[in-house]
Amino acid sequence: MVWRLDKRRLVIREKPLAAPRKQEFGDNPVETRLSENYKNEYVKGFVEKWDELIDWESRAKTEGDFFIEQLRERGAKKVLDVATGTGFHSVRLLEAGFEVVSADGSPEMLAKAFDNGKQYGHILRTVQADWRWLNRDVHGTYDAIICLGNSFTHLFNERDRRKALAEYYAMLEHDGVLIIDQRNYDGILDDGFNSKHTYYYCGDQVSAEPEHVDDGLARFRYSFPDESVYHLNMFPLRRKYLRRLMHEVGFQKIDTYGDFQETYREDDPDFFIHVAEKI
Ligand code: SAM
């Protein structure tokens, strides 16, 4: 509603409600392969649905204390969550006693994370920041950086990946640790998709399936019980390639886990988790 002075009378005019922003992938969605496009993908409608997709309770059960233990083993106290999303890991780590700063490039995601944090009794310290210019917007150094939920896959070219990894590296203390996870794209590229959605995408009412896969794009379709459909365009990162990039940027020791296990068959897990140490 807007108050407007009309001659000498005060009148109230109804302001038309803005239509909700739709996801944008351009004219040919399978040709949209841009690191910038995540902001057009995480629109409010999809962000509102995200927690249905990931289901906090089942996700907490399946991942257990994996990340908390990895961080505690390395004496980490101050953690930067660079892909906060709706805040799942930021909230978990705050509850476990870590000091957390929650960054993300999407204002919609950060707003939702802030609301979710409040529901759990926390005021999240949020910063809107794109990974490629992280040091410009986030200050200080951290014992650990986490980039979880298959987020790094939003970067579509190698220069952006190297830039983001270098920014993470620079923000870590000398003995800091970076934890990045990724979907097992090797399995999808080489053998097709067979995910049982046991990890991360735990909401059992939601289907997440690849609609198009080639060496440069994995386009996933997310269908919800109310018949709404959203998509994400992602780059299918190969496990060895990402490990190599992390080494090249300077990380000295990288342990890779499959679905939270130390030993795994390469084609089997849904997700890989890389724990990369600076020294
Ligand atoms: N970590 C959360 C989770 O596991 O539920 C969110 C995962 S969601 C797949 C990916 C997140 O990465 C989104 O919140 C998106 O806004 C963020 N993101 C993608 N590209 C980014 C970039 N270049 N800089 C900052 N954030 C980015």
Image (spheres, rainbow, N blue to C red):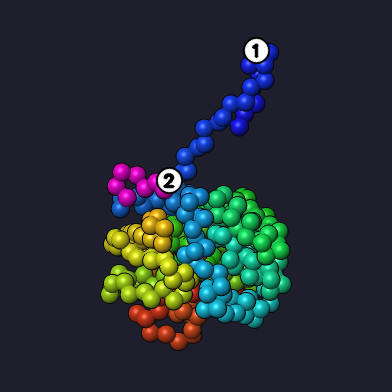
Q: Position of residue 205 (x, y in %)?
A: 43, 68
Label 1 residue near ligand 1, CB within 8 Å: no
Which mark is nearer the camera, 2 or 1? Answer: 1
Q: Does the segment drawn in magenta span residue 28?
A: yes
Queried whether the magenta region covers residue 206, the answer comes back as no
Question: Dividing the image into 4 quarters, which one contains the N terminus?
Answer: top right
- The correct choice, above or below, for 144 with respect to 25 in the image is below
Of 119 and 128, which appears nearest the observer? Answer: 119
Q: What's the amino acid at mark 1?
A: Lys
Is 276 in front, or is 247? 276
Of residue 253 and residue 231, the one placed in the foreground of this image is 231
Q: Nearer the viewer, residue 215 or 123?
A: 123
Could you tell me how far apart the alpha carbons at marks 2 and 1 are, in whole angstroms?
39 Å
Which range of residues does the magenta coloring cover? Answer: 23-29
The quadrant of the picture occupied by the C terminus is bottom right
Most common SS among magenta residues:
loop
Q: Residues within 10 Å of mark 1 (few under 14, many from 20)?
A: few
N-term-proximal mark, 2 vs 1: 1
- Residue, disc 2: 22
- Give the residue at x 41% y 62%: 225
Residue 28: assigned label: none
> Which amino acid lies under the numbered mark 2 shown in the image of this protein?
Lys
**At numbered mark 1, what does the secondary structure look like: helix, strand or loop?**
loop
Task: Tell me the residue at 62%/76% (across/down).
Answer: 68
**Residue 249 shows in this picture:** no
In the rendered image, residue 209, in percent from the top left (x then y), is placed at 35, 65
Q: Disc number at residue 7?
A: 1
Check disc 2: other Cα within 10 Å, few if <14, some if 14-19, many if 20+.
some
